[in-house]
Image: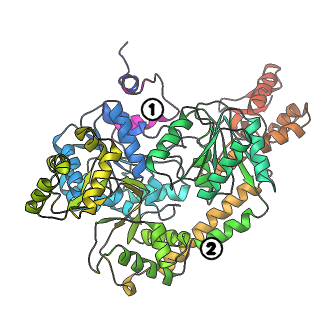
Amino acid sequence: MRPDPMLSTLQRYWGYTSFRPMQREIIDSVLSGKDTLALMPTGGGKSLLYQLPTLMREGICIVVTPLIALMKDQVDNLRRRGIAAVAVHSGLTPRQVDIALDNCVYGDIKFLYIAPERIASETFRLRVRKMNVRLLAVDEAHCISQWGYDFRPSYLRIAELRESLPEVTVLALTASATDEVTRDIMFRLGFAEDARLLRSSFSRPNLSYAVRRTEDKNEQLLRVVRNVPGSGIVYMRTREGTEQIAQLLRDNGVGAEYYHGGLSGAERTLRQEAWTSGRTRIMVATNAFGMGIDKPDVRFVVHYSICDSLESYYQEAGRAGRDGRRAYAVLLAGPDDKQRALKRFSGEFPPLEFIRTCYSEICSYLQIPIGEGRGASFTFNLAEFCARKRFFPATVVNALKILQQNGYMTLTDEMENPARIMFCVSRDDLYKVRIDRIDLDDFIRTLLRLYNGVFTEFRPIDEGELAAVTGYTAEKVREQLKRLWQMRVLRYIPSNRSPLIYMAEERLPEKDVYISPESYRLRKEMAEARYRSMFAYADNDTRCRSALLSGYFGEREAADCGICDLCLARRRSAPPDGLRSRILHEISRESLSVKELISRLGGDPRRAVEEVDKLTAEGKISINEGGKIGIK
């Protein structure tokens, strides 16, 4: 018997001997050359869907994704497996971008991760035609749809990329998309007529959803933590909230730590590693925590506040129970949550006048002249900008989202920016410094040997590399750089963690910044509809929570899960001998498939199947050739 090449590749690089549901079907579709839209829930193994087929054949895969942190995580994971991969995003210098793209053309790179904004650059357009591209993977594909909850105009450039690569297969991936968004994705990406839509079930049979309505969320949270053993995540809306709840848990003897975007990159890494390894039991976090998490044994995810949409709730809750064992997703609902959410919603759409003012003020803060800036990236200190202009940070972030949706500028996720230096003296003057300050001579010579172009522009430097070459500690390296800075020999920008603003177009005069009132109104209506769907989920006390979520994402015949809080309540209240009579009652009216019958019955589907088997064995019911159950 010949070995299965797909399984052999899976085992060679990942060590697995079998696929998760739908993975093989999607990979088969990609290998057969069909454009494919794959809808898979969080934790379903989406990255494998483009990585494995790429490793099975010659050529490169281009992966479009908006998340810089995810790019870095994926590239690091691939390199650890001995697979050549690079990423191109707004945080790189032009030289770094050139090197990465040249390696894709002339080197042995298998995966190029690229931010959607970079697709429009001439540098990329010229190089991509020379690459042996076999697959184009579009991650977070819902971002291309104007009906989606995270629309990004830069994603529309992917259609132009398809024109440059007409023979290349496209795989679009998303964890959450309604039917309307699904149709729009396939249209915007120019899918061929024989394209395939492959949808994994959105039900998670091992994940028990629950809503706890309470005036004392802290008490309810502690009850969950004490009753459910194992690792967990608690999602908060604010950074301050993460710190307060982590302290509450520690005060009650629970090992907990907080995580948010205000922490340094090193601190975030340390905390995530401590939680992943089990040294920290519970991570209290904002939604900055989640990308790249590979921890299968999370036993519960608690949302302390109501989310903005079912899409984000489903993705975050889905980080529990990826190992297939029972896990819990709990939403804590307070009496004033709706009012707070609606207030938050109203702040998501600042007045159009403020959005234009915000655009102009940000450009001035970044010192971008009118008519300049197209394709450039700038480090943006949101807190400093808001303090200087006396703007409310949340309002500025929401204004930036609308500016992004209209194609003006993009605020990236926070990233670690390397230290940068530029000499501000001539080579002759620097030689005099080296003679006068012999204690700095070796250090200056090391800088000149390691980094080119430091007399003409700011160049990124690696403080760790400098420490290794000079024999200093990293702290000593920073001291030496600060000394040279104080001596006015060089300009030194220490490493920092901050977002970047990417300018999609040149700066316009404030009066020329146009936000379509109709587009503004439409987006506001769609956002309101998503809030209402989230409220309906929290208020629901009749329909199975899993079935409600699956139905929202387009599953027409989603069966009841039998393990959410509402299914369990129905089971407890149902008479013990009522199941058999209910089965006979339902099929006496019309013949039903097993799936249809289970959906109508609710409760534990396993009990229903067992009872159907008993009734069949007793000869009281029969199953016809079409799989329908009827009275015999």
Is residue 182 or residue 204 the one in the foreground?
Answer: 204
Q: Is residue 17 magenta?
A: yes
> Does 369 sit above or below residue 278?
below
Q: Is residue 447 visible?
A: no
Find residue 597 and report its image quarter.
Answer: top right
Comparing labels 2 and 1, the label whose residue is closer to the camera: 2
Q: Is residue 350 visible?
A: yes
Secondary structure, mark 2, is helix
Residue 103 horizontal/vertical position (percent):
20, 43
Is residue 419 or residue 138 the one in the foreground?
Answer: 419
* Residue found at the far left of this picture: 428
Report the residue marked by disc 2: 346
> Does 174 sit above or below residue 585?
below
For badge 2, the amino acid type reads Ser
Label whose residue precedes the other's in the sequence (2 or 1): 1
Residue 24, disc: 1
Residue 140 horizontal/vertical position (percent):
45, 52
Residue 585 horizontal/vertical position (percent):
86, 38
Q: Residue at x 47, y 65 (%)?
A: 146
Q: Is residue 247 left or right of residue 14?
A: right
Q: What is the quadrant of the C terminus in the image?
A: top right
Q: Which residues are magenta?
A: 13-33
Q: Is residue 122 magenta?
A: no
Secondary structure, mark 1, is helix
